[in-house]
């Protein structure tokens, strides 16, 4: 019984160490107009699952991570799509290790989930090659990023909420029927 | 005694002779020629309702895996103008034929349910559009990882198929590997 308690305490302590270390990898403080996001995949200059700040200004989408800055011209963006998902509050290696916690502790930790918005873009590079990129961000931010991109010259296959409400009632009814 | 010895030697000799054609018989290579470069087309969702993030993750992972494996001199993206001048170019067309979006939470809690799987029909053609190889490849995430991890699993399997059957260094193919279904 004591042995189990020792394991539990050591696991909790190690988790605490990991969590206290993690703020060192936080992205730089967000500048006005930028949103803290995670670049899941797609941008050539940064690794997968990199945290950073996303900004839409001067006709381009800019992702700034602690190491690199990537720019995608809004005019080259062929499609912007928003979505929603949920993710584990404790993810990554720590999340994987925490699954081994005894007495169902791992399962309990996996129940702690946060909702996120997803924004997916498809764009062409100067050679015409198609790229895709996925970003996750706090809930309620994706739609504003999408609208900003559309205003700067990006295209979309699914009109944003603001656009669809400004359309005629007949069009919106038809869209609802198809959905 | 001598007769028995001679008969035994003769039998062994005949057995060896009959085995020679079997030894010489190599596994039949796929209907393809070694390719120097590959162009990856965008994943076509077809009639399947596939979220945009899955479509993009499939495509990006596939391009990255093909570049990482390094068996092709170049892995071009969809629409890349440089691909037009590449010799021995193989074009990969993909179409989603099955998609089941599971749940990471369900996987965590039950450890048996909530799997995500994506089945994609992959068609490798040459520049002229002649089909070199067709396969159905399935990407799955059964226990650990988020749903998008299934796209990574698919990309790894698809890159292995391309490497083993179409790249210049390909020596053999193993269609019986898990996750593959030879459609030819």
Image (cartoon, grey):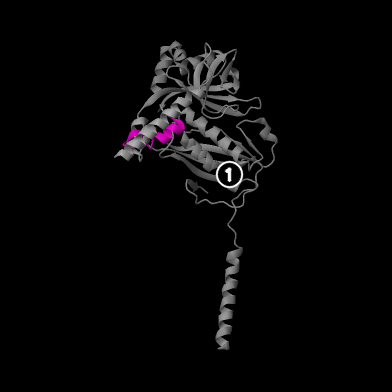
Give the image quarter of residue A155: top right
Counting every numbered tag in the picture gives 1
Magenta-drawn segment: A91-106
Q: Does the magenta stretch include residue A103?
A: yes
Q: Does the magenta stretch include residue B92?
A: no
Query: Residue B62: x percent and y percent?
Result: 55, 36
Q: What element carries label 1?
A: helix
Seen in the image, is A49 located left or right of residue B72?
left
In this rendering, is residue B69 above or below B59? below
Chain containing the residue with disc 1: B
Query: Residue A25: x percent and y percent?
Result: 51, 24
Say if residue B83 shows up in the picture: yes
Residue most extreme to the bottom: B1
The residue to which callout 1 is attached is B162
Placement of the N terminus of chain B among the 4 image quadrants: bottom right
Q: Which residue is drawn at 39% across and 20% down?
A: A176
Query: Residue B154: x percent and y percent?
Result: 50, 39
Query: Residue B71: x percent and y percent?
Result: 63, 43
Given residues B144 and B59, the one toward you in this image is B144
Seen in the image, is A70 located left or right of residue B85?
left
Give the image quarter of residue A67: top right
Give the image quarter of residue B107: top left
The residue carrying pointer 1 sits among few (fewer than 14), some (14 to 19) or many (20 or more) residues within 10 Å by Cα, namely: many
Q: Which residue is drawn at 35% across and 35% down?
A: A8
Q: Which residue is drawn at 58% across and 84% down?
A: B6
Q: Residue at x 52, y 50 (%)?
A: B175
Say if residue B43 shows up in the picture: no
Given residues A68 and B88, the one toward you in this image is A68
């Amino acid at each position: 019984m004591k042995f189990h308690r020792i394991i539990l305490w050591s696991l909790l302590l190690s988790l605490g160490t990991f969590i206290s270390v993690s703020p060192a990898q936080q992205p730089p403080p967000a500048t006005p107009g930028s949103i803290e996001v995670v670049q899941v995949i797609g941008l050539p200059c940064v690794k997968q699952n990199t945290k950073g700040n996303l900004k839409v200004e001067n006709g381009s989408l800019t992702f700034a991570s602690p190491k690199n800055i990537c720019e995608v011209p809004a005019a080259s963006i062929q499609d912007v799509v928003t979505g929603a998902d949920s993710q584990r509050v404790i993810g990554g290696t720590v999340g994987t290790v925490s699954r081994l916690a005894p007495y169902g502790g791992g399962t309990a930790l996996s129940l702690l989930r946060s909702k996120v918005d997803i924004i997916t873009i498809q764009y062409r590079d100067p050679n015409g090659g198609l790229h895709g990129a996925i970003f996750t961000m706090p809930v309620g931010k994706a739609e504003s990023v999408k609208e900003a991109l559309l205003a700067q010259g990006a295209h979309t296959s699914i009109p944003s909420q603001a656009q669809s409400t400004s359309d005629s009632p007949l069009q919106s009814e038809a869209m609802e029927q198809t959905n | 005694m001598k007769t028995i010895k001679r008969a035994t030697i003769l039998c062994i000799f005949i057995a060896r002779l009959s085995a020679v054609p079997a030894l010489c018989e190599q596994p039949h290579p796929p209907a393809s020629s070694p390719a120097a470069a590959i162009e990856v087309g965008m994943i076509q969702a077809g009639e399947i309702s596939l979220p945009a993030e899955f479509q993009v993750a499939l495509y990006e992972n596939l391009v990255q895996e093909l570049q990482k494996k390094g068996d092709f001199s170049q892995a071009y993206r969809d629409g890349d103008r440089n691909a037009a001048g590449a010799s021995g170019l193989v074009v990969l067309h993909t179409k989603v034929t099955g998609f089941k979006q599971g749940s990471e939470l369900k996987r965590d809690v039950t450890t048996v349910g909530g799997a995500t799987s994506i089945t994609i029909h992959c068609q490798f053609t040459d520049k002229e559009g002649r089909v070199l190889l067709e396969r159905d490849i399935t990407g799955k995430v059964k226990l650990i990882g988020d749903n998008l991890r299934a796209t990574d699993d698919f990309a790894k399997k698809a890159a292995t198929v391309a490497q083993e059957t179409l790249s210049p260094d390909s020596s053999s193919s193993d269609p019986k590997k898990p996750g593959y279904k030879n459609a030819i």
